[in-house]
Amino acid sequence: MSKSANFKQNVKKRNWTFVAYPESLPPNWLELLQKTGLQCAVSPLHDRDINANGEPKKPHYHVILCYSGPTAYSVVSRLTQEIFNATIPQPLEQVRGMYRYFSHKDNPEKAQYDEKDIKFINGFNIRDFIELTASEVDQIKKQLTNLICELKIIEYSDLMDYLRDNNFDDEWNVASNHTMFFTNYIKSKRYKKQTTEDGL
């Protein structure tokens, strides 16, 4: 065995990713993933990707595997290749980057996929692996002020209920962590509406 191959065998990481092709997967592969007990995320089927030469790529899935602690390449490889007939697993330094690649969110030149089609297994939640950046929080706050105007929301509780009922998790998190900002904004909108109606 070469030194590079031996090094790969000895790599230990907590988070891994691999590519799987539909025609190679067992029919019950999602059930098998669930039985591993690992927190997993599965991308939408990438069936519109294009190679550099302009030819279409084979349809495929990207999968994230999250172990409870550092796990050897050899262990992960047995899972991906023997059970799922999938590609060689790759260690992940950042789960967030791979998750965003699921939908090509940061690659507008590539085919775009709907984040809603991502499958979560065994309680995988991307928010366990990331914190929103300051610019992302600001962007969500702007989106929420637009939403308040569009829906004519006049109570903070109505905003929170709407976000909860529609599974806007990041938005709910931002709104709950900026209670004073949104309470005052909604109160100001309500007061402005009342004074306009009263002709003040």
Image (cartoon, helix red, strand yellow):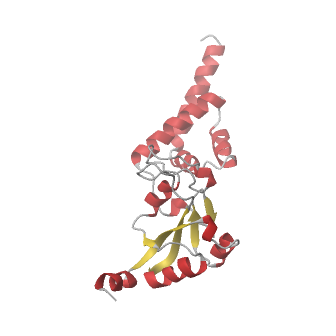
Residue 48 location, x and y as percent?
Answer: 55, 50
- Residue 8 or 36: which is nearer the viewer? 8
Q: How many marks?
A: 0
- Is residue 104 visible in this depiction of the protein? yes
Position of 61 with respect to 70 (left or right) is right
Residue 73 location, x and y as percent?
Answer: 44, 81
Q: Residue at x 51, y 78 (%)?
A: 68
Q: Is residue 141 above or below residue 26?
A: above
- Residue 198 or 167: which is nearer the viewer? 167
Q: Is residue 198 above or below residue 154?
A: above
Q: Residue at x 58, y 66 (%)?
A: 21
View extreme (left): residue: 3
Q: Residue at x 49, y 35 (%)?
A: 142
- Residue 83 or 183: which is nearer the viewer? 83
Image quarter of the N terminus: bottom left
View extreme (bottom): residue: 1
View extreme (top): residue: 199
Residue 62 location, x and y as percent?
Answer: 53, 63
- Is residue 130 visible in this depiction of the protein? no
- Residue 52 or 85: which is nearer the viewer? 52
Q: Residue at x 47, y 74 (%)?
A: 88
Residue 29 location, x and y as percent?
Answer: 66, 72
Q: Is residue 189 above or below residue 12?
A: above
Image quarter of the C terminus: top right
Position of 7 with respect to 110 (left or right) is left
